[in-house]
Image (tube, rainbow, N blue to C red):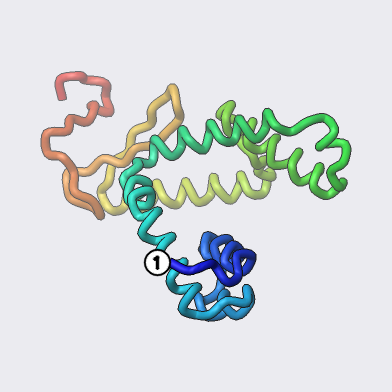
Amino acid sequence: MGEVQNPQGNAEVMVALSDPLRDTIAEIAKECGVSNHVAAHLHQHLAKRFLPLKRALDDVGNDEMAKLFRYRSWEILRSISEEDIENAPLRDKMVSAAIAVDKSLLLEGQPTQILSIKQLENLDTLAGALLKEASRRGIGTMTDDSTQQVTARTETHVGTRMDPSMKWPDPDGDPGA
């Protein structure tokens, strides 16, 4: 094995190849001042070395990834110093504050948007029309008083398969129905 001809160029290729949004290997080679052959060899080396990691990440479930993102988010937030905040441009401060408020509201189960009276009226009209159409099609509805959620009930299959063993409450309150 010979001496590396362009260690700086090779290092730049390795960095460029690790960015999934970068150009082709040939373009990276040209930009970093190495031959296409060297860039392709480095690409193969990276692919072979990190293939087990890629496969392991492919097997990670959504719950595990969500936990990892929450952990990393917390670590990033903890790493921000008062000095970082003071030195940040005003635009970045405003955007960060807005995002932080939205995320904290979501975590508390609060809405992140306030609908205007007109939008609420439109939703009421739409809900009324939906219930009227459901009734016209023979689809009964029931409302859970604690959540104010309306659930459609039907004996026919409307758009989805229904579990035949599912028991719907009697609208008149008879639990045996």
Q: Which of 24 and 91 is in front in this view?
A: 24
Residue 18 in view (yes/no) = yes
Residue 74 occupies which quadrant of the picture? Answer: top right
Q: Measuring from the top left, give residue 85's x and y in whole percent.
A: 82, 36
Kindly identify the residue that appears in the image at 57 percent across and 71 percent down. 5
Direction left: furthest residue:
165
Q: At x 66% / y 38%, what residue is drawn?
A: 102
Q: Quadrant of residue 61?
A: top left
* Side (left or right) of 73 relative to 66: right
Q: How crowded is mark 1: few (under 14 residues within 10 Å), some or many (20 or more)?
A: few
- The x and y percentages for residue 146 are 44, 22
Give above or below for 9 relative to 143.
Answer: below
Q: What residue type is labelled 1?
A: Gln
Residue matched to label 1: 44
Left or right, residue 3 beside residue 115: left
Which x, y percent locates residue 144? 38, 27
Q: In this view, does 136 lie above or below 29?
A: above
Residue drawn at the location 40% of the way across and 46% of the way down: 131
Q: Is residue 102 left or right of residue 174?
A: right
Q: Nearer the viewer, residue 54 or 14?
A: 14
What is the count of numbered marks? 1
Relative to 18, is 81 on the left or the right? right
